[in-house]
Image: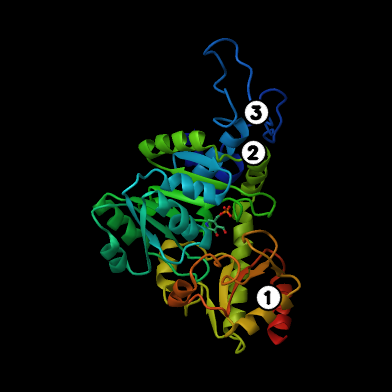
Amino acid sequence: MTRTADQDLSFGIATRAVHAGQSPEPLAGSVTLPIFQTSTYVQEGIGKNKGYDYARTVNPTRQALERNIAALEGGTHGLAFSSGMGAIHGVITLLSAGDHVVCGENVYGGTHRLMDKILSRLGLTFTFVDTREVDVVAAAVTPKTKMLFVETPTNPLMRLADLAALGDLAKSHGLVFVVDNTFATPIFQRPFEFGADVVLHSTTKYLNGHSDMVGGMVALRRDDLAERLQFIQKSVGAVPGPFDCWLALRGTKTLPLRMRQHDANGRRIAEWLAADPRVQAVFYPGLPSHPQHDLACRQMQGFGGMLSIETGSLERARRVVEGTKLFALAESLGGVESLIGHPATMTHAAVPPAMRQAMGLTDGLVRLSVGIEDSEDLIADLDRALGA
Ligand SMILES: Cc1ncc(COP(=O)(O)O)c(C=O)c1O
């Protein structure tokens, strides 16, 4: 666990991205933080060391990443994990057998699988609800509920949760309010400002941004939760290696610039798709036709590059995802290159079909992660694939 410095939080977000946790290294003055590729550290005597004893517990490259991302979120503590799922697992194991979690029904498929297939075997219980409706969330809270877990915008239906209203609800019931901010990133959404206790990420996605590592991150503002999560992090050991931390840090330096371009391309492509009769529906919070566009404008500073389209059938979806050339058919999202995916058989295959159907995650749904290429080239690519 690494604390942010007051000075990190005094800067604007682009300055934090470049500088938080990244002062020149003292030995040679290397401007770029070294990769401390070590498993252990020499100790001067019993109980005498430089604050570093074993690399599962602490590593300087990892500390820099933890401080950097926590500062971007406006948190006071950061903890890095070996994947987004490792981060989510760590956060939920803050709870104990018998505790209950209210979770968004349209979270990432792997999050649902972890809760439904693994953690529920260990005595935790979960209720999955539509987090667009605050009343529905409130109705799911029981005396055993200890945590409220939401993604907004959701993956892949791009539904929003009202962070301020849910923050109030969580506070009034004493729940730990956890927000997966992977899609929006701290550039476009700052959950702590709406009452979140824990903000987490798959750093595999936008924060790294180059599709070359897998990682997870948790930012917190509460000392008690940060200390307990640090104990979990070192005990469970799902920590990232120093090279992956370094890659993620290189990514966060350009996060504000990249997000601007993802957002510009996302808006342009969403508008183009919305005007195309071959597409039955476009799910993108930046479109005025999105049912929660007003909420998006209130709690987000941009809408990013994630959007989904309804093509009408599995066969049409197959033709589109197999027909693009620039958009690569692949799992994952948030990299500089555009990706296309079919949630029902890829990212959300682990969600039971009846649940997918009930929430509108159809076999015709196609998800786009719009990259930072020229939007005209991306549109030409989609145009060709939709006509296939
Ligand atoms: C919103 C969201 N959260 C968490 C995860 C899990 O992250 P990872 O694949 O790094 O374990 C994903 C992965 O796609 C995701 O989309």
Give how far apart the Cα atoms at labels 3 and 2 are: 10 Å
User: What's the distance in space between the residues labelled 3 and 1, CA to CA?
Assistant: 43 Å
Circles 3 and 2, Cβ within 8 Å, touching? The answer is: no
Residue at 34% across, 46% down: 97
**Residue 35 x/y as whole percent:** 69, 34
Callout 2: helix, strand or loop? loop
Q: Position of residue 55 (x, y in %)?
A: 60, 29
In the displayed structure, does residue 204 sit left or right of residue 124?
A: right
Residue situated furthest top in the rendering: 45
When the figure is inspected, residue 85 is found, relative to residue 129, above or below; the finding is above
Give the quarter of the image for residue 334: bottom right
For label 3, the residue is 39
Q: Residue furthest bottom?
A: 277
- Quarter of the image where ligand 1 sits: bottom right
Residue type indicated by callout 1: Val
Residue under the image location 61 percent in, 74 percent down: 268
Asked whether the beta carbons under mark 3 and mark 1 sit within 8 Å of each other, the answer is: no
Give residue 220's quadrant in the image.
top left
Is 173 located above or below residue 377 in the figure? Answer: above
User: Residue lying farthest right?
Assistant: 325
Decide: few, some or many residues near mark 1? Use Cα within 10 Å; few <14, some 14-19, many ≥20: many
Q: Which residue is mark 1?
A: 321
Sequence-first disc among 3 and 1: 3
Q: Which residue is identified by label 2?
A: 241
Where residue 250 sits: x, y (%)?
67, 45
- Who is closer to the viewer here, 20 or 313? 313
| SS assignment at label 3 | loop
